[in-house]
Structures are given as structure tokens and as C-alpha cells.
Amino acid sequence: MNSNHHEDEIFQEKRKPKNPIKFKIELNQEQKEAKSKILENTVTLLAGSAGSGKTLLACQIALEKLFMKEIEKIIITRPTVSKEEIGFLPGDLKEKMDPWLAPIYSNLYLLYDKDKIDKMVLENQIEIVPFAFMRGRTFVNCVVIVDEAQNVTHEQIEMIVTRIGKGSKMII
């Protein structure tokens, strides 16, 4: 049993990138402190004022874990709450969700190369999952980012937290 664990560690080391990941934006001290707490926990609830970098921090952690091959996928969800009537949205699921996910994409693009991020979305390494499609899913070896959680109901947050599986982390 012990030798299999050792072989797994060697395999993981070989898969990791040789060079450190270079993000376009550095985290500030408060974000670095929050990051260390997030990395210690399976589920973390981030709170802070608008513009304090909560989404940026969640995206940075998720990308780093994906690039380090510690996870297989990033799951992003955000409530589709609109105060105005917007009518029918044409297109596939990604196109329908894009208006609500623009702030997440902006943060991902601030951190890393846009073409690389877009490729990761196309290859489903970054998956967009609307709240309506969460029921019945289990997320294994993922970082799940629940953005704008102040706009979800108690029942929705309870449902989303129960979706987390082995090897995953959730940042709300």
C-alpha cells in the first residue's frame, strides 16, 4: 500500500509544470492571507466589499491548482439574476451565460492569457454550470467558484455545497 502511495507522489511530481506559474497580477497581502486560509479548507465563504478582489482571488487559486495539476477542472457558477426583462437569449448554454459570467472572464483574462483561457473553456477544463443544472452533479477533483452568492437562496446554497466531492474545493 505504501509503495503505491509513493508511486502516486512521483507521478504527480512529473505532471507538475517545471517553471513557476506567471500570473499577470500579483495578489496583495490581504489576498495572500485569505488564500492561505482557503487552501486549508474544503469550503470557504469569502466576504468583502465590492472591488476587494474576491473573484480575482478565487480565479487565481483555481487556475494555479489547475496548472499545478492538483485538480482536473474549474467549475464556475453564478446566479442569473436580472432586475430588467431581457427577453429571449439566443445561442447555446455558454452564449446564454456569457452576460452573467463577463466579470469572471474579466478576472481570468486579467490573470492569464486570454487565448489560453478561451482554449481551456473550449476544452471544458473550465466549465460553466448554471445553478439550474447543478442538481444531481458531483464535482470531483475540481475547484468550484460560486460567484455573487449573495443572490442565491438558502436552498440553492445548501444544494451547491452538497455537490462537492473528493479532491475538490469550493470558494463561495
Image: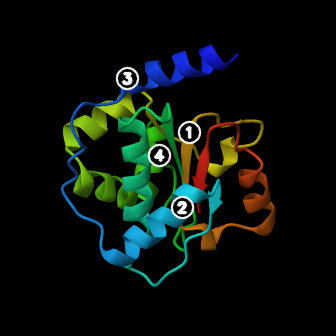
Of badges 3 and 1, nearer the viewer stands 3
Q: Position of residue 165 (x, y in %)?
A: 71, 39
Q: Residue furthest bottom?
A: 49
What residue would you read off at disc 3?
Answer: 15
Alpha carbons under labels 3 and 2: distance apart: 23 Å
Mark 2 or mark 1: name the one nearer the start of the chain: 2
Mark 4 or mark 2: name the one nearer the start of the chain: 2
Instruction: Say which of 7 and 154 sits in front.
Output: 7
Q: Which mark is residue 96?
A: 4
What residue would you read off at disc 1?
Answer: 142
Indicate the amino acid at tag 3. Arg
Q: Position of residue 145 (x, y in %)?
A: 53, 54
Q: Which mark is residue 38?
A: 2
Indicate the amino acid at tag 4. Lys
| Displayed quadrant of residue 32 | bottom left
Alpha carbons under labels 3 and 1: distance apart: 17 Å
Q: Position of residue 13 (x, y in %)?
A: 40, 26
Quadrant location, the C terminus: bottom right
Q: Give the side of residue 149 with respect to residue 86, left or right.
A: right
Q: Which mark is residue 109?
A: none
Alpha carbons under labels 2 and 1: distance apart: 14 Å
Quadrant location, the N terminus: top right
Alpha carbons under labels 4 and 3: distance apart: 35 Å
Q: Secondary structure at mark 3?
A: helix
Crowding near the residue tagged with mark 3, few <14, some 14–19, many ≥20 C-alpha atoms within 10 Å: few
Q: Residue furthest front?
A: 2
